Image (cartoon, coloured by chain):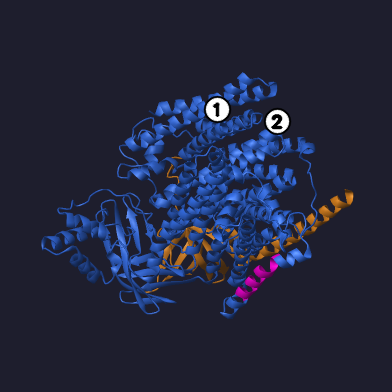
Chain colours: A blue, B orange
Amino acid sequence: MSSLGTFLILTAFVLASGAFAASIAGARRQRQPLIEGGTGLFHTVSALLLVASAVMVHAFVSGDYSIKYVQHLSNAEQPLFYKLASYWGGLDGSLMFWATLLGAFGSVAVYVNRERHRLLLPWVVATISVVQMFFLFLLVIHNNPFETFLMATPATGQGLNPLLQNFYMAIHPPLLYLGFVGMTIPFAFGIAALASGQLDDSWLRAVRTWTMMAWLFLTVGLSLGALWAYEELGWGGYWGWDPVENAGLLPWFTATAFLHSVMVQERRGMLKVWNVSLVIVTFFLTIFGTFLTRSGVVSSVHAFGEDPKLAWMFTAFMGLMLVVSFGLVIYRMPLLRARNELDSWASREAAFLANNWVLLFSAFFVLFATMFPTLSEALRGERLTVGPPFFNQWMTPIGFVLLFLTGVGPLLAWRRSSIANLRDQFLWPVLGGVAIGIGVAALGVPFWASGLCFALCAFVTVTIAQEFVRGARVRQKATGSDLFTSLVGLFARSRRRYGGYVIHVGIVLVFLGFAGNGFKTEEQARLKPGQQVAVPPYVVLFKTISVTDDGRKQMVTAHVEASRNGTPLGKMYPARWFFRGREDEPTTEIALRRSFADDLYVNLAGYELESQAAILQVTVNPLVNWIWFGVGVIIFGTGICLLPERTFAFATSRVPQGAVTTSLILLMLVSGGLARLHAQHVELPQTVTVVPRTPAEKNLQTELVCMCGTCGRKRIGECTCSVAAQMREEVARLVSEGKTQDQVMAHFVAKYGSQEVLSRPIDRGFNRLAWFLPYAVGVIGVVVIGGVAWRWSHRAPESLEAPAMPAAPTASAALETQLDDELRDLD
Amino acid sequence: MSTRAIRVLVSVVVIGGALTALLAMTLRGNAAYYKHVDEVMGNPAEWYGKPMKLHGFVADLQKRPDSLDYQFQVKQNEFAVRAVYTGVVPDTFKEGSEVVLTGRLSADGFHANEVMAKCPSKYDPDKTGR
């Protein structure tokens, strides 16, 4: 099998070169057969890579340890899920995974645009093929994942690093890769536009959706990474400005900038050079991020090993890309002249421009600070380092400016805002911001750390609310329908704009979470049984420490009891797990109690078995859950933005079902995002379930959860740990004694002192809300999206025309025309 | 056109200059030297009080009972320095392990406020030295 894999990669490389050559030749000589041949080869490469991936997956699943890569990253005991995740768990496989994704993305993009952008396509194929060739070249020459042992084949594998055996970590890299790889598509279209000279806005329309999708993946990937760091690394935070994290953030900044500036080009014909450059820079940064994590240029907790040869190859490729891309930009400069000039600084395009500069500066700053140790060593021969405080010192004010611009942008009119207009627009948002600012200051919140952030959040929120209300009112007058229908109509009419506002709401929530970081409190203590540590408003009492083993790992678990303001919260079980064969790298299994106000985060940092003492690290993280919640809102908003193009096509062909499916997928995504709020650890089952003997027993096994504290409240019927086994036995015993289900459950509630042991509704304040929320959001989403879909399907022909103007001129006529104007243009 | 170009140029220079100056200023307070023990202990007095990350190997590790106070030597080649640290240490922090300490050097030793243990590369278990 391994030779098949190697052969596939080799063939793919050869065919990719063919696709490149044929496309270029076809485009330059206007020869359709050549172009079609090139495209065909391109699709073949994608297909070959998919097959190669299948071979790799097969090797992992079947445990083919003659392949070095498989031997390093997998072993027989590993659950299937992590065997699959091992595919991208190492250097070589991750590069191959990258190439496969690029092939799949590229093929879809080329196929979707085959009719609309005929002139661009051969260049798009050529550009993607070059990138593809680079990665395939690496695979062929340097990092063949199918490399086998020459001599003795080991009987078993080493297994995936236990730190990576976490649900989020298994899905975080692919999402991030999807974001990274997705950015290649806009780049390819940008280069195609430059090379072919088709520099009108059509290439922008082709890439808008792609960029947004890639941006979404990047956003979700980054937040999953943060969530992983928060839950798995045990240092109490979610973002440490580690070079690898920064590598993911860099293209995020420039892609965000692009998503904003693209509107200025569509609307006003400005910033053409800027947009092309942003696309190029974003692509460059994705490659640079890959380079950073794989070359050992910067040291990081989670970089792959050092590899100077790979570093050189990446550097050469990045240099080539930059020279060719910007060479093309300079060559096409005359065609990139702006149609308009900036009329006034009090205009929306100026706000977008400012937002772009700030985002670009953020990218520059993060890049600079990340590379600073390397730079200082190269320039001064002295390795200097900077830590997270330096990043925070800079990124906090930058973040505030960005947040402020988020609020300002929508308030300004295109071209020029009059004074009256400004006063009218800014009145309420500024009042809201100031009121909240004074309010939190009165509560004694430090102004600089968090107060300002709260005030800005309020400012932006009021802005967005005002936009929605005014827009809905205008529509209401124009169409004569009720307010709610008008609101839905707003989304239907201008999905990108109002979807964008929803994203901004998500951003505000995320910032709210960041602001909470300002009053994070932490305590480290070495406790003997019976001693306690206080981190207001919580007190954590250490009871005892236990050592258990489940065959795969040894688990050292601290038993603690937490209380908040004197109210007991029940038991928590922070632990350390020592996986077999990896005893020197234990994983930290933190215990977490989430709420919307704050998280109680307990980490067993160390222990002394001889004295029965535990070293506990207790952190109270205020507002942190709003970050994850905000990301959920961002996903939802992006979904609304993404809906149009597709639903639009569906709506014209009068098949509204498509919209419904899309909305369902979106809803699933959103509720998935919410589910993360109360997800803890996902351990894959090894199915050593004690088979229930009676229906009552079976039922009970799903009603009760494992109380070991480390396996994330799995139902005892599914959990593999010894605590669950004991609980199952106990259930069996009680049932055989003739107890009813309620009696057994009451028994367990009494035994564990709380309803914690029950798998379903734990009827307590926050928990009730946490359970209720996904459903509430789900229902609201169904109503909203269903309404939207209904409207589109019923009013499709009508909505293509401009909305009817109200008969009589009203006081807000100016606003209405402006609004309608914008709605039309942004659609 | 030319006045516009000048205006743009001036604003770029002013803003860029201001940011660069600010960057340089904040860097001074935040940057820490990254040094190996033998580089520092050749002439320790020169390094007193400077923020530093110190790279070396742990030796002679002692822990005061019933506390989180650690005392140890950080060694590299024939050079060594006495170091103290209070707090939680990583699992891989033990006799002979490779560590990076953040803190300051003074005449009575190195006061660390952060201990990082260099662990074998976390993602890539490949140590065959390909």
Read off the magenta span. Answer: A425-437
Q: Where's the N terminus of chain A, which quadrant?
A: top left
- Is A756 left, or right, of A121 in this rendering? left
- Is A811 left, or right, of B123 in this rendering? right
**Res. A557 image quadrant:** bottom left
Instruction: Find out whether residue A427 is within the magenta segment.
Output: yes
Label 1 neighbour load within 10 Å: few <14, some 14-19, many 20+: many
Looking at the rendered structure, which numbered label has been put on residue A196?
2
Above or below residue B84? Residue B125 is above
Q: Measuring 34% from the left and 37% from the top, which residue is drawn there?
A: A61
Above or below residue A395? Residue A193 is above
The chief SS type of the magenta part is: helix
- Is A349 left, or right, of A109 in this rendering? right
Mark closer to the chain start, 2 or 1? 1
Give amino acid for label 2: Ser
- Is A529 left, or right, of A642 in this rendering? left
Depth check: give the residue in front, A775 or A786: A786
Tell me if I can see residue A769 in this picture: yes
Q: Measuring 34% from the left and 62% from the top, which residue is drawn there?
A: A575
Q: Give coordinates of residue A387: x percent, y percent.
A: 58, 61
Q: Give coordinates of residue A603: x percent, y percent.
A: 40, 65
> Are the residues flagged by discs 2 and 1 in contact, CB closer than 8 Å?
no
Looking at the rendered structure, which numbered label has been put on residue A42?
1
Q: Give coordinates of residue A514: x percent, y percent.
A: 55, 64
**At numbered mark 2, what does the secondary structure look like: helix, strand or loop?**
helix
Give amino acid for label 1: Phe
Chain letter of disc 2 in the image: A
Discs 2 and 1 share one subunit:
yes
